[in-house]
Image (tube, rainbow, N blue to C red):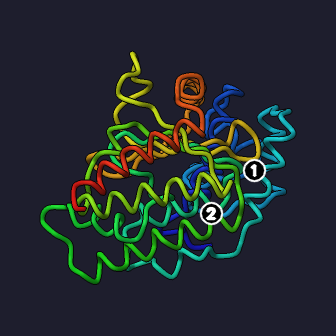
Amino acid sequence: MPLRREPTLRQRRLGAEMRKMRERAGLGGSQLARELGLAPTQVTQMENGKIGVSAERLRTVAEACGCSNTPLIDALAEIAVERGKGWWEKYRGALSIDFLEIAELEASAHRISTWATTYIPGLQQTEAYAAAVFSRFAPSIPNHDLDARTAFRMQRQQEVRLRGAPYVSFIHEAALRMQFGGPRVLADQLASLNKDSLSGRLSVRVVPFDLDTFPGGGENIMFVEGPVPELATLQMDTAVGVMFFDSPAGLARHRAVFEHLDTVALAEAESREFIQSVEDEMRGKYA
């Protein structure tokens, strides 16, 4: 079987979870290979997502590692048997892998939470706002690339909403006021936020400037819950690109961030009033 050139995010995650099983059992790669009757290179390739793993092989690995976490094993077996391609595959080659992997992550989400400090989360951006966000890059990107990125972001929104996974969005006042495309674009974006909040499709909670503490770091983050707590993933936007985290310590730390946000952010009704006040202020700039 040829090695995969570019394992998908979930294929890599399956391999990473198998490596965690082995390490928790105190086994080296060569030791596990002997238990399974494989070459050590095959274990390495499985753990790197370079070769496929059947559900049967996954359960054999779990048994060899003494893993008795049945819900986790069952969830990993589901990943192992996945064969279909997602809607994002039509963009492969047209967009960077970062875009595709975010969509892949969202497609299996059981719950999504976002914390935005610099701009409105991608899953809630209007088309004009999204295009303005992408236009800020220097050097500027070609128009065809700009159009592809914007169209992809709009389809991400549609797909997530069709799946109906619970979604709560915490937005700092700084992100509500940061202008991309000017006050008119921002005002329309804020109106869209409140429309979504009223529709019940997602929960929008505002963290105002006058809060006496700033939860978490300064990056926009998305916390995606899987079918079991161990399969949660944190996605972070950084200056050097998109990053994904799944270490138990990192997940626990960011769960605590969202728990804190839930206690300090304005309630939904208060958040809508706050967003409306900023929208009115923006519309006053071009009235």
Q: Compared to 240, does 29 lie above or below?
A: above
Q: Position of residue 159 (x, y in %)?
A: 62, 69
- Which part of the image, by quadrant, shows the N terminus? bottom right
Q: Percent from the top left, x then y, of residue 269? A: 59, 39
Please tell me the numbered disc located at residue 160.
2
Could you tell me the amino acid type at mark 2?
Val
- Which of the marked residues, 1 or 2, is nearer the chain's N terminus? 1
In the rendered image, the residue lying farthest to the top is 212
Label 1 neighbour load within 10 Å: few <14, some 14-19, many 20+: many
Q: Is residue 254 above or below residue 119?
A: above
128 with respect to 163 (left or right): left
In the figure, is residue 250 to the left or right of 140? right
Task: State whether residue 43 appears in this view.
Answer: no
- 98 or 222, nearer to the observer: 222
Query: Between residues 25 and 279, which one lies in front from this camera angle?
Result: 279
Q: Amino acid at mark 1?
A: Leu
Give residue 277's position: percent from left, percent from top. Answer: 40, 44
User: Badges 1 and 2: C-beta atoms under 8 Å apart?
Assistant: no
Q: Is residue 226 rendered to the left or right of residue 205?
A: right
* Disc 2 element: helix
Tell me, yes or no, if residue 207 can be seen here.
yes
Where residue 97 sits, quadrant-wise, is: bottom left
- Please tell me in which quadrant of the rendered image residue 223 appears: top right
Q: Secondary structure at mark 1?
A: helix
Q: Which residue is mark 1?
A: 76
**Name of the residue lying farthest toward the left:** 139
Q: As displayed, is residue 123 above or below residue 154?
A: above
Q: Is residue 141 above or below residue 76?
A: below
Residue 16 in the image: state x and y as whole percent. 60, 44
Which residue is at a point 69% across and 37% down the rendered structure image?
A: 230
